Image (spheres, grey):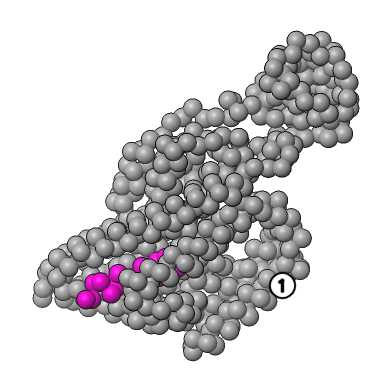
Amino acid sequence: MRNNRLLIGIITGIIAGSLLGGLNPDAGLAVHFIGHLFIKFLMMIVMPLIIAAMISGICRFGDVRKLGPLGFRTILYYLGTTAISVTTGIILVLMIHPGNLASETEQIEARGGIVLENAPYSIRDNTIILENSVLPDEYTSSYSVVLLDRNVKGTILFHRKNGNEHIEVSSWTQDNKPLTDLAVSGEGIAIDKLPAERFLQEERSITDILREVLTGLVPSNLFKAMAENDILPVITFSLLLGAVLSTLGEQGKPVVDFFNGLNEAIMKIVHLAMYAAPVGIGALIAGRLGEAGGFTGFLPELLRLGKYAFTVIAGLLIHSLIILPFILKFFGKTGITRFAANTTPALLTAFSTASSSATLPLTVECAEEKNGVKPRTAGFVLPLGATINMDGTALYEAVAVIFIAQINGITLGVPELAIVFLTATLAAIGAAGIPEAGLVTMVLVLKAVNLPIEGISLILAIDWFLDRCRTTVNVWGDSVGAKVIDRYVNS
Ligand code: ASP
């Protein structure tokens, strides 16, 4: 398909899908299965593509010793760009400070507490009596109670319901000074979680995380890894097989020819997938907006977390519109406009599927067919990039973790920021190229700086949207990387 026609098709699909799912969520949900079919089609070809592209790519180098410098440059590029993107994220979140919420009640709600603005209360013998039972049962000793109509806080000792709600308080404070007794009545209380109780004791060192990533490299069963779409171990196996085949000479030739042929055939299937992209992408967006309740369900959530979402998106834009184009121009000697236009089908697929792995077939197609990256480079660099080079995810993890700290009123010092920098980079490497994988590996970063995992629930509502944005940047980073590395390998 001609590039322009494809682009126009995809953009039309996106607009139609957004309008359909945004204005009529039910209709969006009804067409979601078409998008699901598109993802399944892409996932179906990912594993054979990786194996065939890597093995055939490696064998085309002719000499296995050339793999060393290629591998070294690839890892250097991945680590370098990921480090830059995490740094951008950290600087932005420290500057914008999205976790500074306007009022105390906003902060309490953000921490998962409960705010009852108009609840009448009376206090006798250090026991608050609420007229109606409104609190869930778990509100006991690990929480504090805030009297909203006066600047008083108390630590909950005991919570009992029998018609009325009785909350026994062990100690009161006003402006952080202890109060002995309170006998008042008023209106409006909030239940906040006490910081100390929210913290997890479980420590997890950087070495633990590193160990996990490294052991994940080797499959105990190749077919199990393939069946579970676990890309990294399949890459290890393909690398090994390709390297060994390239040293076998005549004996290995039939096998190499087989993989070359398989690679060609798979790329033809990818070509077919391109035709389905406009409809598939449109249906995925319609379905996801439908799931979020249309524009009216999604926009209030986005606005509620607006400052945080803005910080993530601003970081992603800086990385993808300033830093990566600079690297492409300076190191890849390639202009941005045409390169970006050629990569757009892959980028929009990344946005709609939220999966670098599912997008991989299109990433390879755009790099090889349109941007002139040699298949031997693309076959090596892109599958690896789809799993371990995640600039967008790394940036997002750093911003999200520091945001959660800010919401909890915790200031991270330079040593903690250094840990966030390291663990966010590792967590992004460890994240699979599937939807919301970054949210899961973020637990590592939170634990490393001893922040509450429940903090994740704060950002959950709009994560599906930010996931799409960061996945697009992940794929963009891989595509730029393939071009840059290709230049150095060929020269
Ligand atoms: N969905 C992302 C990807 O596939 C990973 C993430 O959750 O950040 O690249």
Rendered location of residue 115, percent (x, y): 77, 35
Q: Is residue 469 visible?
A: yes
For the magenta stretch, what is the residue range?
475-491
- Does the magenta segment cover residue 322? no
Badge 1, how many Cα within 10 Å: few under 14, some, many 20+?
some
Rendered location of residue 247, percent (x, y): 12, 68
- Disc 1 marks which amino acid? Leu
Rendered location of residue 372, percent (x, y): 34, 81
116 relative position to 246: left or right: right
Query: Circle 1 sits on which residue?
Result: 19
Determine the residue positioned at 29% across, 78% down.
374
Main secondary-structure element of the magenta-colored stretch: helix
Q: Is mark 1 within 8 Å of ligand 1?
A: no
Q: Is residue 467 visible?
A: no
Q: Residue furthest front?
A: 95
Residue 188 picture quarter? top right
- Does the magenta segment cover residue 480? yes
Q: Secondary structure at mark 1?
A: helix
Frontmost residue, 372 versus 363: 372
